[in-house]
Image: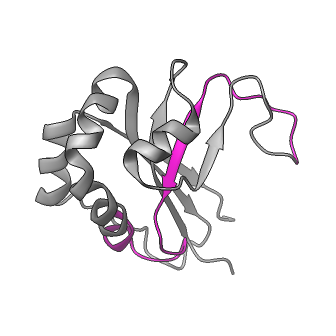
Amino acid sequence: MDKNEIHLSFCIWGFKDITHDKLSKILEIAPSKIFIEGERMNPKFSQLAKENGWFLDASTDKFTPFEQQMDSILDLLTPKVELLKPICDIYYCEFSLALFINNNEESTPSVHLSSRYHDLAKELRFEFDLDLYCLQNA
């Protein structure tokens, strides 16, 4: 039976006046993936991106606990607060979490937002988006 999966990313959305490369250069971080408005979001599917997006995925695998994934992203973003402030002021920034519940024998993954997360969220004013997908068989 498949294990439950946790997919966590920090995302920057809706920019038109700056390129993906420029964002990466400012932050000194290479994105995990990008969306380009009007282009396919995934080469396997025909869905087109409605807006530009820049994504930084957790540096861990999809079976690693949420807190460890969050810490891996916070480790990269926290030293960049001063660089992120103007970006978060202008563009829509969020942590995007998708939980895939594939296994009813395994406990549902916990999602605990630490004070470290809250401190950064307070300073940068980004959002938190949670999507829950229950794919397990009854």
The percent position of residue 15, horizontal first and vertical second, equals 50, 23
The residue under the point 18% across, 48% down is 120
State whether residue 129 appears in this view.
no
The residue under the point 39% across, 68% down is 69
State whether residue 56 appears in this view.
yes
With respect to residue 27, does 105 lie above or below?
A: below
Is 23 displayed left or right of 137 in the figure? left
Q: Specify the segment rendered in magenta.
A: 44-70
> Dividing the picture into quarters, in which one does residue 68 lie?
bottom left
The percent position of residue 132, horizontal first and vertical second, equals 51, 49
Is 91 displayed left or right of 81 in the figure? right
- Give yes or no for residue 57 being in the magenta stretch: yes
In this view of the protein, which residue sits in the foreground, 12 or 104?
12
The residue under the point 36% across, 61% down is 73
The percent position of residue 37, horizontal first and vertical second, equals 69, 24
In this view of the protein, which residue sits in the foreground, 106 or 28?
28
